[in-house]
Image (cartoon, helix red, strand yellow):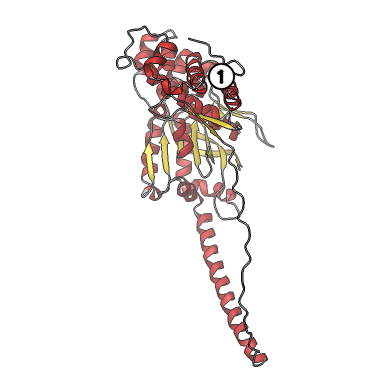
């Protein structure tokens, strides 16, 4: 794979600034362990900045970047097209995380291999100058007397008072309705006819493979090269054939499917743009442009790792020790740094985490539901959908405008024969 480098003076000053951005990307964590994608990006950017972007095509990239033989036929070998799709996703990840403060953004339009450099700095348009306004002279007729002035003012005051009382009644009814059923506010926020909402069940296949191989998978690896990474992970352990066969199937939890069914039957879902999307089919563009309901912890649904910095309660994502627990990043007064699922006498207690947070883009919302096992997930789902169970806690999270604010919550669920039966709120906190 060719190593690209541009000599100073060979390109314009603007192009040099863009090439510096390319080098920053190549040295980032998102690209450090992806040499093939790094070579791909470096090659097409160097060619474009040197004025040869119009010559870029699939066959040329296959020969120069991927070392294909001279008889390479793009119609029979999709390596370039597949890698371009992965590269687009990896660039989206970089510019939403490590490169979120960059002045420039690199896009690779679909159907093209020519990168586009777009500035994030938008110059504000100068304000229009204020023009003088000719105000016509108005002849004011003297009032007839004090009585003629007081009567209109009295009528206006009475109308204003009536409007204020009516508005107060409406506001009181609205806030009272929200306070009585705060869980409805969550679903009304997530499920709308204006924006798409994606319900993403856990990738149980991925969780099983990681547990069997004792190897955790990061969201960067999951996002970048899912088929190749998962195939290599499946074949790396003591049961390569069995894991490879499992990897070819899309398994998920029955608790997640039940939740998808129950959410779909909510009144708020009637006119909502609600879709179910398997975790492996999700893209970063979907994450940014949709409301989300993410099921499962970081092992079963790596997408939740993107929001790890926004929450304090999180399931452990290291399967090697085989223990199930919830970590608390910044424990508050009365909280522990770690909570473990436990067996107490003849009863089993599972843990569940609920997080209702802001999305990556303004105006978007994310609901994450995680459990140390299926019963923990089921308990969290039951809590959210049961007004009698959740209203007491959620009513404490209502903002001054009457809406339920963002929050995270840790639940303990008593299980009977693997099914959730009773739940207890261990901790909760409001979020921005």
Residue lying furthest bottom in this view? 144
State the image quarter where residue 252 is shown. top left
User: Above or below — where is 160 with respect to 90?
Assistant: below
User: Above or below — where is 3 with respect to 160?
Assistant: above
Q: Is residue 297 visible?
A: no
Identity of the residue drawn at 66% across and 32% down: 330
Picture coordinates of residue 155, whole percent (x, y): 58, 82
Identity of the residue drawn at 45% across and 38% down: 293
Picture coordinates of residue 39, whole percent (x, y): 49, 15
Judged left or right of residue 54, residue 148 is right
Residue lying furthest left in this view? 76
Q: Dividing the image into 4 quarters, which one contains the C terminus? A: top right
Q: Nearer the viewer, residue 206 or 153?
A: 153
Q: Nearer the viewer, residue 423 or 288?
A: 288
State the image quarter where residue 66 is shown. top left
Picture coordinates of residue 219, whole percent (x, y): 50, 24
Q: Nearer the viewer, residue 196 or 316?
A: 196
Badge 1 marks a residue whose secondary structure is helix
Q: Is residue 127 visible?
A: yes
Residue lying furthest right in this view? 333
Residue position marked by numbered label 1 in the rendering: 26
Judged left or right of residue 204, residue 127 is right
Judged left or right of residue 322, residue 77 is left
Judged left or right of residue 82, residue 303 is right
How many numbered marks have been drawn onto this rendered protein structure? 1
User: Above or below — where is 54 with respect to 261?
Assistant: above
Picture coordinates of residue 175, whole percent (x, y): 54, 59
- Dot 1: few (<14), some (14–19), or many (≥20) neighbours within 10 Å? many
């Amino acid at each position: 794979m060719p190593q690209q480098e541009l000599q100073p003076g060979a390109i314009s000053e603007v192009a040099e600034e863009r090439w510096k951005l390319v080098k920053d990307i190549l040295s980032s964590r998102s690209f450090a362990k992806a040499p093939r994608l790094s070579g791909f990006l470096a090659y097409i950017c160097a060619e474009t900045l040197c004025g040869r972007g119009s010559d870029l095509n699939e066959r040329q990239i296959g020969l120069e970047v991927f070392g294909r033989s001279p008889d390479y036929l793009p119609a029979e070998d999709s390596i370039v097209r597949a890698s371009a799709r992965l590269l687009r996703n990896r660039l989206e990840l970089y510019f939403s995380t490590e490169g979120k403060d960059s002045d420039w953004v690199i896009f690779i339009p679909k159907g093209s291999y020519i990168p586009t450099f777009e500035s994030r700095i938008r110059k504000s348009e100068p304000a229009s100058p204020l023009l003088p306004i000719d105000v016509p002279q108005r002849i004011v007729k003297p009032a007839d007397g004090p009585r003629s002035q007081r009567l209109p003012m009295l009528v206006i005051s009475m109308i204003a008072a009536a409007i204020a009382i009516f508005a107060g009644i409406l506001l009181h009814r609205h806030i009272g309705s929200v306070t009585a059923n705060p869980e409805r506010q969550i679903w009304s926020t997530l499920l709308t006819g204006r924006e798409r909402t994606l319900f993403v069940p856990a990738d149980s296949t991925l969780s099983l493979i990681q547990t069997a191989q004792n190897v955790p998978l990061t969201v960067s690896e999951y996002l970048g090269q899912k088929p190749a990474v998962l195939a290599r992970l499946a074949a790396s352990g003591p049961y390569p054939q069995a894991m490879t066969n499992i990897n070819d199937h899309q398994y998920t939890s029955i608790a997640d499917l039940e939740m998808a069914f129950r959410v779909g039957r909510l009144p708020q879902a009637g006119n909502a743009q609600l879709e179910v999307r398997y975790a492996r089919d999700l893209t970063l563009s979907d994450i940014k442009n949709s409301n989300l309901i993410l099921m499962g912890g970081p092992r079963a649904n790596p997408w939740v790792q993107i929001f790890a910095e926004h929450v304090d309660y999180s399931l452990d994502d290291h399967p090697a020790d085989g223990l199930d627990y919830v970590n608390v990043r910044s424990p508050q007064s009365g909280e522990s740094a770690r909570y473990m699922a436990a067996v107490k006498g003849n009863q089993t207690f599972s843990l569940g985490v609920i997080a209702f947070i802001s999305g990556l883009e303004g105006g978007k919302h994310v609901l994450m539901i995680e459990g140390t096992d299926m019963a923990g997930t089921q308990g969290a789902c039951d809590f959210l959908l049961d007004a009698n169970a959740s209203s007491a806690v959620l009513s404490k999270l209502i903002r001054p405008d009457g809406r339920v604010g963002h929050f995270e919550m840790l639940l303990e669920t008593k299980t009977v024969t693997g099914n959730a039966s009773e739940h207890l709120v261990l901790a909760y906190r409001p979020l921005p």
